[in-house]
């Protein structure tokens, strides 16, 4: 039904989407997850041309909607969109909100539109609120009216952008229940959401977005239980990461310490853990600096909240072998210190690089 090829979107010099490729079949329910700021909203907005893509192709039933002469208004009628902030017309009743589109854009009669509108309000459980104004409705009710309004235009697919994130927690359930019903009725849906349990239950496929692309996609069992990529795993397991790339032996250690401190503070880690992390980072980098060859280290600090674990990941260039087990160094004090600080150290070879994982208890001893 929809095929997206090499879609990119820049805002001035900032590339938000770099190369998005996807297809969505009729009747599928796609959940789109990922850290904030990774372009999930931008992707939805590009799909229905609320944002103009910078390059790439979007084909709907084989027709390229970015081609010249495509009628954007017609296209939007095929794709409904539900926003976080409802976007109802404040001066119109619930029913009025549902009638305006069919009357003005589709040429339906008022009576026809009102009859269908009432049916739809009934479907989302709000028949008795037909004559209420938006300000007389709760957030959950407003969002259900917004969904009904979307349906009044008989779209072929509905795009949801975090439909429950502006809601009081007590109202999330009623909105998710309506979306679940649409899914069961066979409506094609693409839903950006942070509700992981919901995404797992309702979707046929999940897109994990990161780094300007669909970083990993798959059935919910794969994405939630056995993600293939490190970033997906970190996101699903709520691992918070801070990344550095060090390419000079005389990098600015104190600036790095400052960022480590901030990271630890942000995640409410005890001061003692922050200091041990600093010490470990310094010792390991010192150790790597002494080794011959190019110095090129990608350093990631990962905080695994669920396991109360701080992990230092080092991805370094160099000959095969655990850099911490180079022969000439068995008696080194730094190394002893590193071993002492960690509860576990793992090494693996990946391509031309060595990956080290050093793990610390995130609670103070
Ligand atoms: P997400 O929905 O995944 O949180 P968004 O698609 O909203 O991410 O935004 C991705 C990035 O694009 C953000 O860094 C945001 O600041 C930027 N961005 C979004 N819309 C605009 C815009 N109209 N102008 C400039 N930058 C934008
Ligand atoms: Mg967003």
Image (spheres, grey):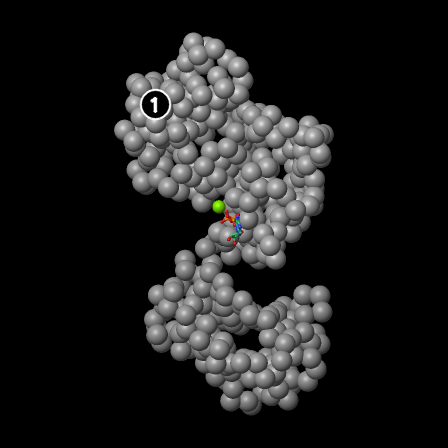
Identify the image quadrant of residue 46.
Answer: top right
The crowding category of the residue bearing disc 1, from other C-alpha atoms within 10 Å (few below 14, some 14 to 19, many at least 20), is many
Q: In the figure, is residue 346 to the left or right of 69?
A: left
Instruction: Say which quarter of the image contains residue 124.
Output: top left
User: Which image quarter is the C terminus in?
Assistant: bottom left
- Give the residue displayed 65% in from the left and 51% down from the top: 18
Residue extending farthest to the left is 136
Reading the image, the residue beneath label 1 is 93
**Can you see residue 229?**
no
Q: Position of residue 215 (x, y in %)?
A: 61, 50
Nearer-the-camera pick, 91 or 154: 91
Residue 175 location (% of width, % of height): 39, 32
Asked whether mark 1 and ligand 2 are closer than 8 Å, the reply comes as no
Instruction: Note whether 26 is above or below 113 in the view shown.
Output: below
Q: Secondary structure at mark 1?
A: loop
Residue lying at 63% horizontally and 43% vertically, measured from the top left: 53
Residue shown at 55%/45% (left/top)? 42
Which percent across, then down, holds residue 220?
A: 54, 41
Left or right, 304 with respect to 70, comes to: left
């Amino acid at each position: 039904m929809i095929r997206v090829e090499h879609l990119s979107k820049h805002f001035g010099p900032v590339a938000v989407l770099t190369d998005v490729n996807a297809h969505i079949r009729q009747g599928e329910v796609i959940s789109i997850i990922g850290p904030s700021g990774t372009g999930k909203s931008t992707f939805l907005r590009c799909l229905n041309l609320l944002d103009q893509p910078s390059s790439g192709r979007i084909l709907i039933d084989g027709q390229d909607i970015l081609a010249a002469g495509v009628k954007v208004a017609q296209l939007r009628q095929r794709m409904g969109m539900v926003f976080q902030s409802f976007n109802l017309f404040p001066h119109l009743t619930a029913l009025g909100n549902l009638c305006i589109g069919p009357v003005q854009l589709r040429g339906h009669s008022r009576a026809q539109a009102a009859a269908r509108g009432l049916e739809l309000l009934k479907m989302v459980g709000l028949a008795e609120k037909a004559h209420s104004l938006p300000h007389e409705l709760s957030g959950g009710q407003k969002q259900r009216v917004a969904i009904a309004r979307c349906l009044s235009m008989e779209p072929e697919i509905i795009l949801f952008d975090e439909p429950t994130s502006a809601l009081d927690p007590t109202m999330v359930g009623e909105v998710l229940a309506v979306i679940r019903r649409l899914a069961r009725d066979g409506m094609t849906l693409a839903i950006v959401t942070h509700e992981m349990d919901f995404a797992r239950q309702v979707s046929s496929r999940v897109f994990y977005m990161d780094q300007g692309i669909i970083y990993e996609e798959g059935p919910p069992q794969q994405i939630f239980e056995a993600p293939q990529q490190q970033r997906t795993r970190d996101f699903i397991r709520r691992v918070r990461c801070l990344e550095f790339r060090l390419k000079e032996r005389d990098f600015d250690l104190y600036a790095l310490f400052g960022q480590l401190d901030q990271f630890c503070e942000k995640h409410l880690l005890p001061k003692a853990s922050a200091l041990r992390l600093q010490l470990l980072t310094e010792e390991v980098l010192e150790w790597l600096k002494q080794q011959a060859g190019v110095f090129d280290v990608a350093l990631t600090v990962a905080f695994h909240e669920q396991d109360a674990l701080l992990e230092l990941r080092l991805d370094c260039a160099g000959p095969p072998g655990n850099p911490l087990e180079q022969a000439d160094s068995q008696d080194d004090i730094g190394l002893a210190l590193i071993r002492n600080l960690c509860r576990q150290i793992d090494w693996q070879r990946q391509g031309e690089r060595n990956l080290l994982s050093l793990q610390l208890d995130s609670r103070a001893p």
